[in-house]
Image (cartoon, rainbow, N blue to C red):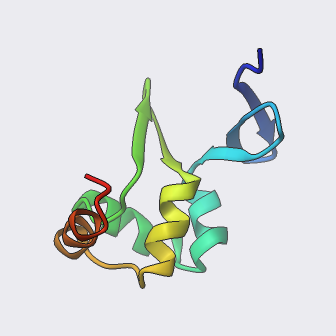
Amino acid sequence: MAQDILHFRGPEPAVSSGTGEVLLTDVKGLNRLTSLSIRTLRRMDSVGDIPGRVTVGRRVLFQVEVIREWVRAGLPDREQWNLLQLRNGKR
């Protein structure tokens, strides 16, 4: 039975599965995944344009796989992302 393990690698918290795959990341990890500035990411998050947001206590983390799909889709805003998800049968 593989359990999720919380790893701390430098400033980026990551929750990984037993296979070592990173499941959650913080805004600094988003910065690395998207090449967007932290300020831009915080602004986008404040209006709800970043999907896959998870709050753990006071920490805000993001689901890495959802972020990868969002980037592949061209970083659409919340409304466009929801339409894409409905069209693809994921909601």
In screen coordinates, is 45 left or right of 1?
left
Above-or-below relation of 60 to 89: above
Left or right: 63 as drawn, with respect to 3: left
At horizontal 40% and vertical 34% (from top left) the residue drawn is: 55
Q: Quadrant of the N terminus?
A: top right
Front-most of 76 and 2? 2
Outermost residue toward the front in this view:
89
Q: Residue furthest bottom?
A: 74
The residue shown at (33%, 60%) is: 45
Residue 65, x across and y down, in percent: 56, 56
The residue under the point 67% across, 70% down is 32
On the image, which quarter does residue 46 sit in? bottom left
Determine whether 49 is above or below 57 in the image: below
Q: Is residue 41 above or below residue 6?
A: below
- Residue closest to the eye, 61 or 40: 61
The residue depicted at 28 percent of the width and 60 percent of the height is 89
In the image, 42 versus 90, the foreground residue is: 90
Left/right placement of residue 59 relative to residue 2 reads left
Side (left or right) of 77 relative to 34: left
- Quarter of image, res 20: top right
Q: Position of residue 26 (x, y in %)?
A: 57, 50
